[in-house]
Amino acid sequence: MALLNSLASSLESYRGRDRLIRTLGYCCQLVGGVLVEQCPSRSDVGRRLLVVSAQLSHCRTVLRLFDDPAMFVYTKQYGLGTEEEDIFIRWLSVLSNMADQLYYPCEHVAWAADAKVLQVDSARWWTLSTALWILSLLLGVVRSLWTALKLRQKLWSLTGTFTSQLPRSKRRAMEARMWSEVLTLLSNLADLANAVHWLPRGVLWAGRFPPWLVGLMGTISSLLSMYQAARAGGTAEADSSG
């Protein structure tokens, strides 16, 4: 019952529904791809799961048609990141916000071209949106790696020299943030592997992933994202109750 209540609570928000749809879509692609390639007797089931995966992906694309205002508000509020202490993180975040902001309209045009709403070449717009996604992921990888290393260095210096002066709660908070950055790094790397696969053939490993491998990378990324969201929610509840 607790799991059901948690699931129902997560589905009340747009982000929660998107995480669930994403996870289900990639899981279907993983299982469907394995069945098609490894189990000829179950290949029909595998193909149906791949269809479900494609439809769930299309669902997320349509829902993202309405993400531009929220992204614009976030980008505007962050601005040039003047409240960020680390100037390197500040400019990484600014560039990442710009890439994310440009990603949405490019994807919208690609979707509209596929739907025959606009008479343009959808492949070019899909490539452009994927390139912007890759840029955002690369910036996210660098940001998470830099932050995790800085936290690790700070934690080691504090615990190694001033152990008695560092409260246990602060140490645990720093460790939790460091591992959160590591999980974000792994999630972004998994997404990056898929993003490169969706570029035009001839670019690195573009077009070489079988469906099950795309599903595996996406499932890893999605599960890490869901775990972090659940962990953040649990921490928020603990803080409010405390």
Image: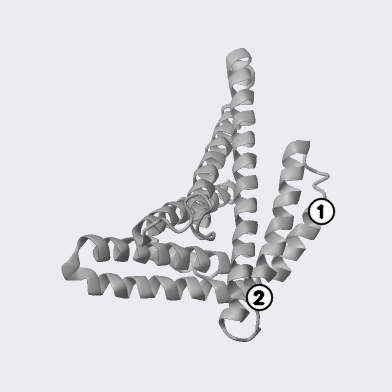
Q: Quadrant of residue 168?
A: top right
Q: Secondary structure at mark 1?
A: loop
Earlier along the polypeptide chain: callout 2 or callout 1?
Answer: 1
> With 75 as the anchor, is 15 left or right in this view?
left
Q: Report whether residue 85 is seen.
A: no
Between residue 199 and residue 168, name the one nearer to us.
199
From the image, tell me which residue sits under label 2: 109
Crowdedness near tag 1: few (<14), some (14–19) or many (≥20) residues, C-alpha within 10 Å? some
Residue drawn at point x = 23 percent, y = 70 percent: 43
Q: Position of residue 155 (x, y in %)?
A: 60, 25
For badge 2, the amino acid type reads: Val
Q: Nearer the viewer, mark 2 or mark 1?
A: 2
> With 136 as the anchor, is 180 left or right in this view?
left
Residue drawn at point x = 59 percent, y = 34 percent: 148
Q: Position of residue 28 (x, y in %)?
A: 35, 66
Q: Report whether residue 190 is seen.
A: yes
Q: Above or below — where is 153 with respect to 79?
A: above
For badge 1, the amino acid type reads: Gly
- Quadrant, the N terminus: bottom left
Report the residue that reaches farthest toward the bottom: 117
Q: Position of residue 164 (x, y in %)?
A: 60, 16
Q: Position of residue 109 (x, y in %)?
A: 66, 75
Q: Quadrant of residue 127?
A: bottom right
In the picture, the disc for residue 79 is: 1
